[in-house]
Image (cartoon, rainbow, N blue to C red):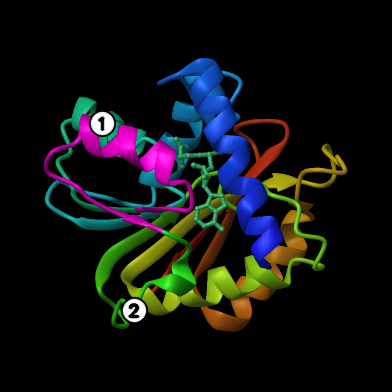
Amino acid sequence: MNEQQRKRIIDKHRDSLTRYGYHPNALYWSGREIQEIRFKVLADIGIQDGDSVLDLGCGFGDFKSWAIEQGVRLNYTGVDLSPDILTQAKKRHADGIFLSGDLFDMDFAEQSFDWVILSGALNEQLNDDSAYAKSVIDRMYALCRKGVAFNMLDARFLKAHDLHSQIPQDILLYCQQLCPNCELYDDYLKNDFSIYMRRV
Ligand SMILES: C[S@@+](CC[C@H](N)C(=O)[O-])C[C@H]1O[C@@H](n2cnc3c(N)ncnc32)[C@H](O)[C@@H]1O
């Protein structure tokens, strides 16, 4: 991701936050329900009470709140490019760790977290033939002890000039080169798919 793309993502979230405040629309989700459908798919990889989770592109830290509603308290670290969104996240979660930047700004040691999750943070169009997304997948897998769960937009149903989408099978094949134990789910929302990469 170049500096211009980074600035564009930061600026668009500053604008959306000014417009919508604390609301899924500020994260470019159409509503709470579809945000939480994605959370459930990711959590179903097997995230349990007391696990440590790195949430990449964490937004307001809503995954952490949603997990608490399900009776699951996480040792939670959120990373997000938008400092404005993160200011809100920190106000809402006194007990989480929130770091501003992208994954490559962080110097986490390998296998630092039980789980690494990502919902929606690979949807920005970078016009790089998914090179950045693939480098993020590599790094997420290196950072997990148990596994990675992430989603992307499904290019079979959604192609927009400003959104990054991919063919699920192509990303699955990429993930399988890194991890022998991968699963694909594409039956929960029309435009979306999720991949699990299990280390154990
Ligand atoms: C669609 S929102 C989803 C937020 C959160 N995961 C949720 O579902 O509530 C995507 C978030 O990822 C952040 N983001 C986008 N690209 C990113 C990147 N390369 N690294 C870190 N954060 C990123 C945005 O600032 C935004 O907060």
- Residue marked by disc 1: 65
Q: Is residue 73 magenta?
A: no
Can you give x and y, in whole percent of width and height, for residue 166 in the image? Answer: 77, 55
Considering the image in quadrants, where does the N terminus appear?
bottom right
Can you give x and y, in whole percent of width and height, for residue 152 in the image? Answer: 64, 49
- Residue at image position (36%, 44%) is 43
Camera sees residue 12: yes
- Residue marked by disc 2: 107
> What stretch of residues is rendered in magenta?
79-100
Of the residues tagged 1 and 2, which is closer to the observer? 2
- Residue at image position (30%, 30%) is 66
Three-letter code for the amino acid on which mark 2 is drawn: Asp
Q: Report the Cα–Cα distance between label 1 and label 2.
A: 26 Å
- Dot 2 lies on which element? loop
Three-letter code for the amino acid on which mark 1 is drawn: Ser
- Dot 1 lies on which element? helix
Is 143 above or below relative to 25? below
Which one is nearer the viewer's eye here, 154 or 79? 79
